[in-house]
Amino acid sequence: MAAETTAIIHSSHDINKLSYEIFSILESKFLFGYDDPNTVVAATPPKTPGRFPSPLSAGKVRILSIDAGTGVLAAVALARLEASLAKQCRNPDARIADFFDIAAGSGSGGVLTAMLFTRSASGRPLFSAGDALRFIMKNRRKLSSAGRKGVFRRSGGIFRRLFGESTLRDTIKPVLIPCYDLSTGSPFVFSRADAVEADAFDFSIREVCAATCSEKARLVMRSVEGRTRIDAVGGGVVMRNPTAMAITHVLNNTVEFPFAAGVEDLLVVSLGNGAEDTGPPAAAKLLKIAGDAAAEMVDQAVAMAFRQSRLTNYVRIEANCPASGGKSPPPPPPLRAVEEMLLSQRSVDSVLFRGRKVLEKTNGDRLEWFCGELIAEHDRRKGSSIPTVLIKPTLMSRTSSATNTTTSTVAST
């Protein structure tokens, strides 16, 4: 127990260190002089070498960020958002990946990211958001027991059945999925951009998902060609809320996002995963508290970075899940009841050092509004000759059609 507590303390220290580093980046790039009208801030950042001047018609980079956690709230929100997008654009085959330029997910959020952004044999996303929601509802206990019962064995398990031999290069859009590398004592981010650049950073999607979920056990994994070794524990341990990571990636990636010069050039939705008390052991609960606090700090720092645009360019969806009273998680209620309970909760606006304000609009209301913004940006691009995003090309998938399973897999997984 003493060794476990010591490990938790070290992990909490790493979380605080990482949070400080993230906030320092945000502070130096966007927050300095926040309240001083004579100081240049986020709206006019220093020009970055290689960054093109942002034309008025370049549009906004659309960022999806998904927290670690149970996965239920994020999956519900994504299913609602995708259904609204399909209805408003009058295309029943519309998918989340069609309306976002980059996705970041940690823990269960990484699994959702992989499900919605991995390419199938047809070239379309492997799963719909509805498929992902059904998978999360059926497997949330397995996901919360990461590393146990052989769920994430390299030779099989639920992730092999979902993704086959697909790798990071087989994702449709840029993705960012973190874990913590015990061998280097630092966070490691699985990135499509890195995988396209070098074979040494291309990993199988099934092992990426296992690594970011494995908060209760370590997972030793290697890149597809075997040169890069990662001794991984879960992404939620060090980066429960990956929003700041996604924003800094976009603003510093001049190759794929040449016109994103500041937060005013972004359209971000950050999906929390709800607060749920499942009665873990005391040491594990301490780690969860530290992770939740770090996620909250990231949310508040990002909201402050967006200044007055935080209600238009940045949307955070968070809710409270039913508490279990310190006992094992109860059987999940009917899906429709879960959706209604989570989406009917009133949303909050967070600003660093200024607390949280409960808004009049519910989570469902804000998702509907954000859907309209995504549709508007999607339509704007149809009539623009200036590309907002220049995705790095990759070779045709090395895998055969048999490796990319169909959505029917979810029903039996």
Image (cartoon, rainbow, N blue to C red):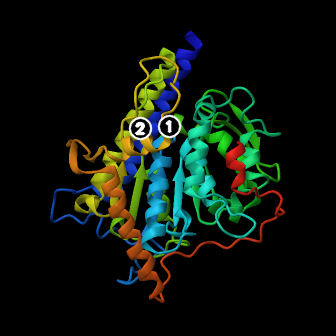
- Above or below, 231 against 277 in this view is below
Can you say which quadrant of the picture contains the C terminus? top right
Answer left or right for 121 relative to 334: right
Which x, y percent locates residue 138? 61, 38
In the image, what residue type sits under mark 2?
Gly
In the image, what residue type sits under mark 1?
Gly
Residue 233's label in the rendered image is: none
Answer left or right for 86 relative to 303: right
- What is the crowding at mark 1: few (fewer than 14 residues within 10 Å), some, or many (at least 20)? many
- Above or below, 96 against 323 in this view is below
Nearer the observer, 66 or 387: 66
Residue 274's label in the rendered image is: 2
At a point 52% along the width and 73% down the height, the residue shown is 91
Which x, y percent locates residue 369? 32, 63
At a point 64% along the width and 60% down the height, the residue shown is 192
Q: Evaluate if marks 2 and 1 touch, with contact meaning CB atoms under 8 Å apart.
A: yes
Answer left or right for 270 relative to 133: left
What residue does disc 1 label? 69
Nearer the observer, 72 or 247: 72
Q: From this viewpoint, is residue 326 visible?
A: yes
At a point 53% along the width and 58% down the height, the residue shown is 103
At a point 80% along the width and 49% down the height, the residue shown is 227
Q: From this viewpoint, is residue 207 visible?
A: no
SS type, badge 2: loop
Q: Which circle's residue, 2 or 1, is located before the other in the chain?
A: 1
- Above or below, 284 against 128 in this view is above
SS type, badge 1: loop
- Above or below, 322 against 228 in this view is above
Which x, y percent locates residue 78? 48, 54
